[in-house]
Image (spheres, rainbow, N blue to C red):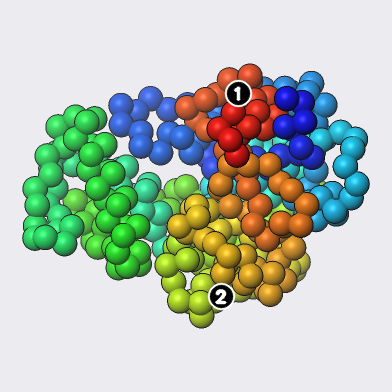
Amino acid sequence: MRQSRGRGVIFTLHHVRPQRAETFAPNAHLEITPHFLDAALRRLTRDGYRFVPLDELPALLSAPEGGRPFAAFTLDDGYINNMEYALAVFERHRTPFTVFVTKGFAEGSHSIWWETLAVLLRQAKEIRFDFGRGSERLALDGPRQQWEAFDRFARYIHRFDEARAVATLDMLARENGIEPTDIVRDLVMRPAQLQRLARHPLAALGAHTISHRALARLSEAEARIEMEVSADYVEALTGVRPAAIAYPYGTPEAAGAREAGLAGRLGFSVAVTTQPGLPAAGKTSYLPRMSLNGFYQKRRYVSALASGIPLKLMGR
């Protein structure tokens, strides 16, 4: 199945930080340790991969096949730990990487609902909330009830008007003594930090919209504004127009053909999803990525993901 490997792979990461002890960690899949990132880069080097900047992919994918496969690394949302922990690992292995910046997170004007929700459900013993059928009481006596509540809120946010749903969740958090924007400021790089990171020769910044809403659920005009203003913001920070954008959530339900068309018309040469797969020629406005998942932090999983064999076994 050697031919499954294709030309290369794009990896997606979020948090890179030391492991934390939490009995309820609904976002654990979004974080890996610096040790695992180091091990992943060592394994890929052993497997013959070359590390490339994301903006080189259009040229790489249009070139004749052959030679060493590539690996490109991306990190979504702009977390502080990307600079505190991931940067040193990338430096050690001379690995280029792209951090996708959400304007509202960097400016502290928008909350990160999945982070707010994790804190709320860990701290509260019970909450009351109206999911659309009247106020309900949710007991939070243990991990099972916390997980059930997290899943209900996630469905609520993705099913209804996202901005309104997140605002309602933020209000509930404040009623329970939690300020959602404080969480964002603790987690996400501020503009000055992003500027400092962007000056590093291995780092690049990409666009990740203003509010991190699912673009496919917005009007075309709103989706365009989210994408264009995000690029404007990165350009204002760095003086360079970003070549790449990552669609928030990155699923087929969150971004599709319309968003790929918008990305092309707005001048992005690379646009990435979170859909698993290996990049192919001619599809740079809707590229798949493989997730380095916090639940699978072993070197052999990295080789397997990069190889494409799991996708082949699933018939993709």
Q: Is residue 302 left or right of residue 3?
A: left
* Secondary structure of residue under mark 1: helix
User: Depth check: 222 or 1 in front?
Assistant: 1
Q: Is residue 315 above or below residue 288?
A: above
Q: Are marks 2 and 1 in contact (CB under 8 Å)?
A: no
Q: Is residue 98 above or below residue 104?
A: above
User: Which quadrant of the rendered structure holds the C terminus?
Assistant: top right
Q: Residue at the location (66% across, 52% down)?
A: 287
Residue 306: % across, % down = 69, 32
User: Which residue lies most toward the bottom here?
Assistant: 221
Q: For the residue marked with disc 1, what is the amino acid?
A: Tyr
Q: For the residue marked with disc 2, what is the amino acid?
A: Arg
* Secondary structure of residue under mark 2: helix
User: Depth check: 292 or 103 in front?
Assistant: 292
Q: Is residue 163 left or right of residue 228?
A: left
User: Depth check: 92 or 64 in front?
Assistant: 64
Q: Is residue 257 left or right of residue 148?
A: right
User: Depth check: 184 or 268 in front?
Assistant: 268
Q: Residue at the location (8% across, 60% down)?
A: 134
Q: Which residue is mark 1?
A: 301
Q: Is residue 84 above or below residue 129?
A: above
Instruction: Please say whether residue 269 is visible from this viewpoint.
Output: yes
Give the number of marks: 2
Q: Which mark is residue 224?
A: 2
User: Which quadrant of the rendered structure holds the N terminus?
Assistant: top right
